[in-house]
Image: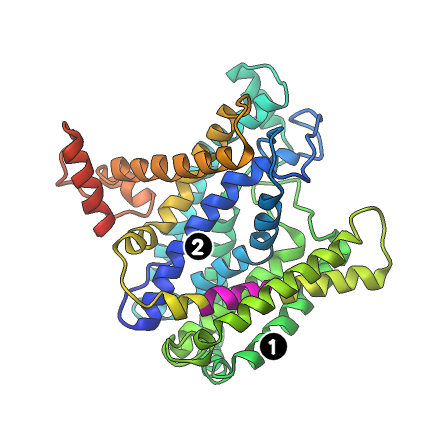
Amino acid sequence: MPRPGIASRSSLALANLRAVVILIVLAFHSVLAYLGWVVVSHAPFTEPPFDWRAFPIVDPKHFYGFDLFCAWQDVYLMSLMFLLSGLFVWPSMTRKTALLFARDRLLRLGVPFAFGVIVLIPIAIYPAYLATGAEPDLSAYWHAYFALPFWPNGQLWFLWQLLALNFVVIALNWIVPQALPALGRASATLGQHPARYFAVLVAVSAVGYVPLALAFTPWAWSNSGPLALQFSRALVYSIYFFAGVGIGTGGIDNGLVSSDGPLGRRWKLWLAVALGTLFLWMGLTSLTMNGPAPLVIEIAADVGFAVACAAGCFFMLASSLRFGVNRSRALNGLGTNAYSLYLVHYDFTVWLQYALVGSTLFAVIKGALVFAGTLVLSWITLVVVRRVPFAARLFGLTPEASMKLRVRKPAELYAWLRQFVSQ
């Protein structure tokens, strides 16, 4: 997730959207333990189907409203994140040499991915190991962890795929220098007509999604190696990333995400389309969940996913262009630190869910507590980490070596947090 400079209403809206997206990511992970349709798997930690990869903790308390929320986010959220990540690739590339851009991407995405997979993810997965009834011993956990046929990536799978796509852009620009400018011109022209852009995006993503979903099912992940991959969506994420690259190359103030364009003015229409296509996809998908379904139904469900995915992204973009063009100190702080929050939040989410398993609180209250606790603890972590230059750079933060190591009074801590948010 590159850091955009806020220089126009469009860039401000997109920066605010980044803040909203990271809040949705935290909320999504926070409530996964309380979904009604998830069944507790009694399989050992080291044996398939490895359900703990998606649901580290499954709480006996559940709320079906969370099912609807998570279903919607699962359809479009990661595609939107890839699109947003592609928006500022071209402006960044034009300011640097290819080698410097590649080095920066490697340091910003590759190094945190490696650190997270080696350090953060094992800490996050330990409660999932305990939840399977395994022996609560660290040596036993490490033995089981390294006995897995894959290396758990947690939420960090996004980073390695994003890094790979950045290198694809570098190679493409080197081999065919006119390809990205041509993509930008086409994107700017098509973006002036959101309905046409939507139709093209649906068609291209359906071509990239449907064959893989039929071959591997929509849900299958790789079960070997160090790099997690959801087979059916790999091309979809690439398509949305390059859609973002095209929009950014053509100029965010000129095409689809122009602040005075038709997309933002018709946000109500895109909300209706997003909800309608979501329920259509859910209805079609439900027909495929209980055993083999006719091929035509499976194809219809997969096409429905492509439509609902694009509609969800368009609604989020439209609503940000309609309501997110004003400066907000809170959203600015969240947007600036969205990438860092994404890196660190998962450990707190899983451990808080595990800590609340035995509680008799309602699922809604548990979900709210996990979300709030994750946000606060993640933010405090960034405040602390930011004061260590090497660690700050590792987590995508600007070092603040001038800050005192100890904050002795609550008032000073409050002022410190306000200063951090405002930057």
Point out the stretch of residues depicted in magenta: 308-318
Q: Horizontally, is 306 left or right of 139 in the view?
A: right
Q: Which residue is mark 1?
A: 200
Dot 1 alpha-carbon crowd within 10 angstroms: few under 14, some 14 to 19, many 20 or more = few
Image position of 25 (left or right of 144): left
Q: Is the N terminus in the top left, top right, bottom left or bottom right quadrant?
A: bottom left
Residue 15, horizontal then vertical, whole percent = 35, 61
Q: Is residue 151 visible?
A: no
Q: Amino acid under label 2?
A: Val
Please tell me whether mark 2 or mark 1 is closer to you in this view. 2
- Residue 362 image point, x, y percent: 54, 31
Q: Is residue 412 above or below residue 356?
A: below
Q: Which of the two labelled residues, at mark 2 and mark 1, occupies the earlier sequence position?
A: 2
Q: CA distance from mark 2 to mark 1?
A: 24 Å
Q: Residue at x 74, y 52 (%)?
A: 216
Q: Residue at x 35, y 72 (%)?
A: 10
Note whether residue 311 is visible.
yes
Secondary structure found at label 2: helix
Pinpoint residue 36: horizontal percent, then vertical percent.
65, 38
What residue is at 43 percent from the left and 61 percent from the top? 85
Left or right, 228 with respect to 89, comes to right
| Amino acid of disc 1 | Val
Q: Nearer the viewer, residue 159 or 328?
A: 328
Residue 152, labelled with which disc? Answer: none
Looking at the rendered structure, which numbered label has been put on residue 21?
2
Q: Is residue 311 magenta?
A: yes
